[in-house]
Amino acid sequence: MDTLPATSAERPLFAMQFTSSPRGARLARRLAVRRMEEWGYPPSSDTSGTVALLVGELAANAVRHGRVPGRDFALRIALDAGSRLIRIEVADASASTPRLDPETVAGPEDETGRGLLLVEALAVRWGTAPRDPVGKTVWAEILADLVVTPTGVPSGP
């Protein structure tokens, strides 16, 4: 586990590798929610829910479409408290990049095919980048809600 402590000079950061399996994707989502709570966003908050959904979708895509036998996927979440920007990155060992095809619409009974549409709808922006030495990173950024202090005054985390 690669977790850096948050100090006033550092951005809060969570980074960890997971087995490329459905269980690894579920664990990534659970730990993301736990980290968001530590950063001041309880599981019931919109911010935590959005992060959970994005981590879940990106991790599931890494497992389903980006899995290379014997390789893990990596999750990285960074919070810029000043701008309230949260960046979620999921990296896998496959070089194939995901594409959002607006012409392809999942049917009401389809169990797949909506992940990138959800990412597109919830993220301020998202994209892909090559990963050195192999693979790719799919990233998404969201704006965090303001945290309300016990005095009722909004503030950043």
Image (cartoon, rainbow, N blue to C red):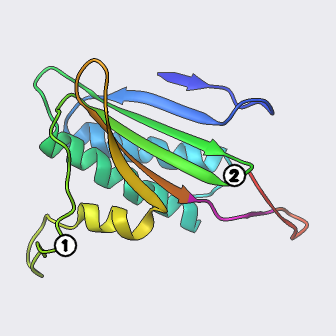
Is residue 101 something that shows in the picture?
Answer: yes
**Residue 21 figure quarter:** top left
82 left or right, relative to 119: right
Q: Quadrant of residue 23?
A: top left
Q: From where the camera sits, is residue 44 visible? A: no
Residue under label 2, please give it. Answer: 40
The image quarter containing residue 128 is: top left
Label of residue 102 in the image: 1
What residue type is disc 1 on?
Pro
| As drawn, 99 above or below 130 | below
Residue under the image location 65 percent in, 36 percent down: 12
Alpha-carbon span between mark 1 and mark 2: 36 Å
**Percent from the top left, x then y, of residue 13?**
59, 34
Measured from the top left, where is residue 54 in percent x and y? 39, 56
Q: Nearer the viewer, residue 31 or 11?
A: 11
| Above-or-below relation of 109 to 66 | below
Q: Is residue 135 left or right of residue 56?
A: left
Q: Nearer the viewer, residue 10 or 101?
A: 101
Question: Residue at horizontal 56%, vertical 62%?
Answer: 47
Disc 2 secondary structure class: loop
The segment highlighted magenta reads 143-148
Q: Residue furthest bottom?
A: 108
Q: Earlier in the sequence, mark 1 or mark 2?
A: 2
Neighbours of disc 1 within 10 Å: few (<14), some (14-19), many (20+): few
